[in-house]
């Protein structure tokens, strides 16, 4: 049997299935239950489909136990994808009480060519064929389904700009250029990305709140194409509770409030 590779997430999904792991579909990607017991979501970025990320949610108030769980998930996923993909260390991207969200970059080593078929082993064929047991249907009410959508009616619930600006200034005070660059890299933003350049310029030119607000207004005028706006929406979804969340929120408001 021949199965054509469609994209990097497909490569990963088929490899995990061949390892005998339970994989279910999620909007924009897949979820795998690892041997360590953790559920990991694997998805490609909407703005850059060639960039793949892994995300795991850990609900544990004890920091040491969280560390053990995330290291176990890292080891288990890496072992399951040996020769297929390289998993960078999981990094904390969001923390709300005992609930922590970790993201990791996945570098797929297998060439993804839609024109070249690959051979699927007998074990993988059996697992893929047994779709009712392995691939779970996506429920629209699943709270963990990845959604990069937004409802413009939410604009009535936008946070107060002044308080966001103060929070943004406070968050950026402890951030250096290297931290900013690593964070933007983690979100898969290309060096030429309009959104990346906007956030970099805002960071470099901000010393006071008025300067921050002025820089955001100026950069918002440059985010005009549908692709750039979608990328900004994706960034807003990825950086929740990180040191960029308030700056991105302010930029997002400026861009979409002008539009609507």
Image: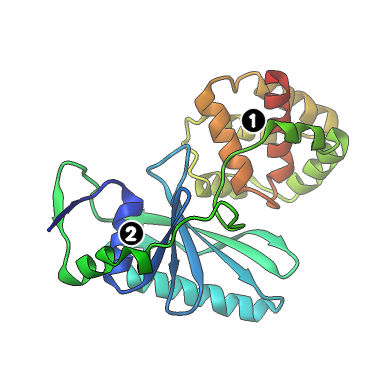
Find residue 163 and report its horizontal and vertical position in percent: 87, 40
Q: Where does the N terminus fall, quadrant-wise?
A: bottom left
Residue 211 falls left or right of residue 177: right
Q: Are marks 2 and 1 in contact (CB under 8 Å)?
A: no
Residue at point 57%, 42% (across, down): 148
Number of numbered markers: 2
Q: Secondary structure at mark 1?
A: helix
Is the image coloured rainbow, by chain, by secondary structure, or in one colour? rainbow
Disc 2 or 1, which lies upstream in sequence? 2
Answer above or below: position of 117 versus 152: below
Q: Could you tell me if residue 194 is visible in this image?
A: no
Q: Secondary structure at mark 2?
A: helix
Question: Closer to the observer: label 2 or label 1?
Answer: 2
Answer above or below: position of 185 versus 123: above
Which residue is nearer to you in this view: 9 or 250? 9
> Gap in Å between the C-alphas at discs 2 and 1?
36 Å
Q: Where does the C terminus fall, quadrant-wise?
A: top right
Residue 188 falls left or right of residue 2: right
Answer above or below: position of 163 versus 59: above
Name the quadrant containing residue 63. bottom right
Find residue 11 and report its horizontal and vertical position in percent: 29, 55
Question: Dot 2 corresponds to which residue?
Answer: 12
Find residue 205 and report its horizontal and vertical position in percent: 71, 30
Please give the label number shown on residue 201.
1
Name the quadrant containing residue 160. top right
Residue at point 54%, 51% (across, down): 146
Residue 93 falls left or right of residue 79: right
Find residue 247 and report its horizontal and vertical position in percent: 72, 38
Which residue is nearer to you in this view: 228 or 59? 59
Within 10 angstroms of label 1, few (less than 14), some, or many (20 or more) residues? some
């Amino acid at each position: 049997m021949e199965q054509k590779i469609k994209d990097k997430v497909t490569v990963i999904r088929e490899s995990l299935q061949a390892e005998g792991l339970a994989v279910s579909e999620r909007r924009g990607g897949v979820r795998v239950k690892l041997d360590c017991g953790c559920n990991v979501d694997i998805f490609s970025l909407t703005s850059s489909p060639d960039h793949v990320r892994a995300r795991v949610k850990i609900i544990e108030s004890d920091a040491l136990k969280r560390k053990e769980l995330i290291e176990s998930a890292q080891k288990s996923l890496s072992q399951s994808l040996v020769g297929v993909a390289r998993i960078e260390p999981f990094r904390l991207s969001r923390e709300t009480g005992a609930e922590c969200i970790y993201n990791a970059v996945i570098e797929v080593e297998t060439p993804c060519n839609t024109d070249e078929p690959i051979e699927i082993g007998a074990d993988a064929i059996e697992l893929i064929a047994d779709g009712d047991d392995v691939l779970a249907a996506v429920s629209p009410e699943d709270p963990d389904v990845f959604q990069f959508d937004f409802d413009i009616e939410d604009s009535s619930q936008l946070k107060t700009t002044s308080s966001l600006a103060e929070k943004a200034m406070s968050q950026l005070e402890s951030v250096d250029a290297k931290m900013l660059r690593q964070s933007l890299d983690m979100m898969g933003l290309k060096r030429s990305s309009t959104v990346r350049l906007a956030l970099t310029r805002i960071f470099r030119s901000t010393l006071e709140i008025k300067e921050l607000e002025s820089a955001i207004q100026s950069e918002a005028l440059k985010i005009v194409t549908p692709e750039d706006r979608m990328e900004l929406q994706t960034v807003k979804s990825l950086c929740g509770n990180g040191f960029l969340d308030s700056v991105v929120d302010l930029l997002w408001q400026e861009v979409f409030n002008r539009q609507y």
